[in-house]
Image: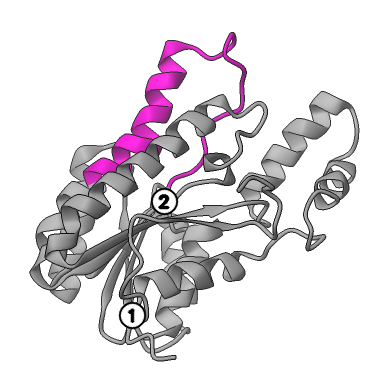
Amino acid sequence: MELQLTGKTAVIAASSQGLGKAIAEGLLREGANVVVSGREEGKLKDVVAELQQIGIGKVVFRRTDITNQEDIKQLIQTAVDQFGGVDILVNNAGGPPAGSFETITDEQWQTAFELNLLSYIRLIREALPFLKEQGGKIINIASSSIKEPIPGLLLSNTFRTGIVGLTKTLAQELAQYGILINTVAPGRIATDRVRHLDEVNAEKMQISREEVEERVKGTIPLGRYGKPEEFAKVVVFLASDANSYMTGSSFLVDGGMVKSI
């Protein structure tokens, strides 16, 4: 299958580690140019040094706080200045803290909104003029909670579901420009975020993190956590020219964990 990503430019939010970094690596291997971003400049420099050894695409970074509107503008401008435009936008953000309805404060609600939903809106708004030039792809990273709420993750359950509504609506509005937009939702992928969630649950249950992990694996038909690169392959396909007729859809990458239809 020809993905035809050589020479395309991708902007990836929150890509100094975890799923974002894996996506950057996958796109680079297929020849795309990539702008990675995150809050820690030192970590970004290390990531770029590592990713420069991969594939034929070029990679640069921009230190970005995606809750800051000006930072978002500068991130998109970096892609324009370095590579001439934006063909692919991958929206990604770290997860909000765990908590129940009665313990979460107004400040936490506002912070989670700005991180996990408003940042996606702003990134799309800034990239849109360039995506409209020749058509393009937008991939919104969410969570398996879009299909089945995760206990204790009220903030994530709420705003990740909002991403689906945004994606579905924009699929209608942006199709006229040749822009395809989809949501990709990870289940239990082996990242630092998932490890942290397992540690939180282990503390609540007063058992080890390893025992929590084994219990979760028992709910996954494939019997294991996914690898970041496995998740990235789905994103790379959706970002490529091989995807020419899929838009407004949500895709689970969860090893069969979510049982809902």
Find the distance from the CA under tag 2 to the CA under tag 1: 18 Å
Q: Position of residue 152 (x, y in %)?
A: 65, 26
Q: Secondary structure at mark 2?
A: loop
Picture residue at 60% right of the left edge, 70% below the top: 230
Looking at marks 2 and 1 on the same chain, the residue that comes earlier in the sequence is marked by: 1
Q: Residues within 10 Å of mark 2 (few under 14, many from 20)?
A: many
Picture residue at 71% right of the left edge, 51% below the top: 257
Return the residue at label 2.
92
Q: Tell which of 46 and 102 is nearer to you.
A: 102
Seen in the image, is 54 located left or right of residue 254?
left
Q: Tell which of 123 and 139 is nearer to you.
A: 139
Seen in the image, is 197 located left or right of residue 112?
right
Q: Position of residue 237 (x, y in %)?
A: 43, 75
Return the residue at label 1.
32
Magenta residue span: 93-122
Q: Tell which of 164 and 216 is nearer to you.
A: 164
Q: Position of residue 82 (x, y in %)?
A: 18, 72
